[in-house]
Image (cartoon, helix red, strand yellow):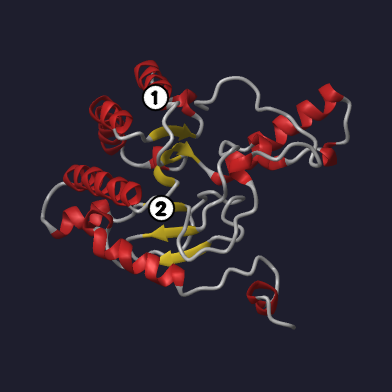
Amino acid sequence: MSFSGKPPVKVKEAIVQDNVKEAEPSNSPDHIAIIMDGNGRWAQQQEKPRAFGHKAGVDALKKTIEYCAKHHVKFLTVFAFSSENWLRPAKEVDILMSLFMLALKQQSSKLHKNNIRLKVIGDCARFNSKLQAKIKDAEHLTAGNTGLTLVVAANYGGQWDIQQATQQLIEQAVKLKLPASELDLADFLSTRGIPDPDLFIRTGGEQRISNFLLWQLAYTELYFTETLWPSFGEAEMDEALKAYSSRQRRFGKVSEQITGENP
């Protein structure tokens, strides 16, 4: 993981961080999560190698970051590399790692200049030492920024996240001599301190969440599009936000409770 040390521990009834308070009803999402799918298929359509599609995918991500910053989205979380992606051909994995390193080198200062904070979540220990160092440098450089927070999930899996959080929770419960039920699992997830996504987008036509943010997506609105990620631009994001704004988020309540009408 890219975060150092143990997470702050608090009893459920104790302090609640300001940025993770229960969100008030809104027609625009504060936190958007995206599975950026379709780079390889897009490249095939262009009769280009898969690497060409991944490079185009990086360009699409830059435009999405700009869009979210412009529209005052507070958090953007993207699935850059899953724990299962190591199963891909070694050549493609090497290309993805090289692109990740290059993007950090070229974009960190630009993120900082635009008041964007970067966080990388996932088991970063498997990355080489140079990439790990570059991740830490970029996070440190942008740590004080107050605009959009860009969360990059790299070597991340939702099941892994829950497993490592559970282990940490048990260790802390033993250390503090508290029942495990007195601690909140969310405080030990890699996304601690970050509100759960309001809107989840997956491009490329697949309709599944593929081990991404399993805990955090419990009440997230899901949006699937056939558009391949390199072709996902401002118009497609507008459509996703339009769909989101038409939905009523009830969080287990009935409609009348949300609207204030008598049930």
Residue 25 in the image, given as x and y percentages of width and height: 57, 64
Is 222 above or below relative to 105?
below
Among the 4 quarters of the image, the one containing residue 163? top right
* Residue type at numbered disc 1: Ile
Residue pictured at 67% horizontal, 37% vertical: 187
Residue pictured at 30% horizontal, 28% vertical: 108
Which residue is nearer to you in this view: 119 or 214?
119
Quadrant containing the C terminus in the rendered view:
bottom right
Compared across the picture, whether 173 is left or right of 63 comes to right
Residue 160 in the image, given as x and y percentages of width and height: 58, 39
Q: Earlier in the sequence, mark 2 or mark 1?
A: 2
Residue pictured at 68% horizontal, 27% vertical: 8
Is 252 above or below relative to 31?
below
Give the residue number, with chain letter if any, for mark 1.
Answer: 135
Give the residue number, with chain letter if any, for mark 2.
Answer: 34
Residue 38 in the image, given as x and y percentages of width and height: 29, 56
Residue pictured at 27% horizontal, 26% vertical: 109
Q: Assign a secondary structure to mark 1.
A: helix
The answer to whether residue 225 shows anywhere in this view is no
Give me the C-alpha separation between circle 2 and circle 1.
20 Å
* Residue type at numbered disc 2: Ile
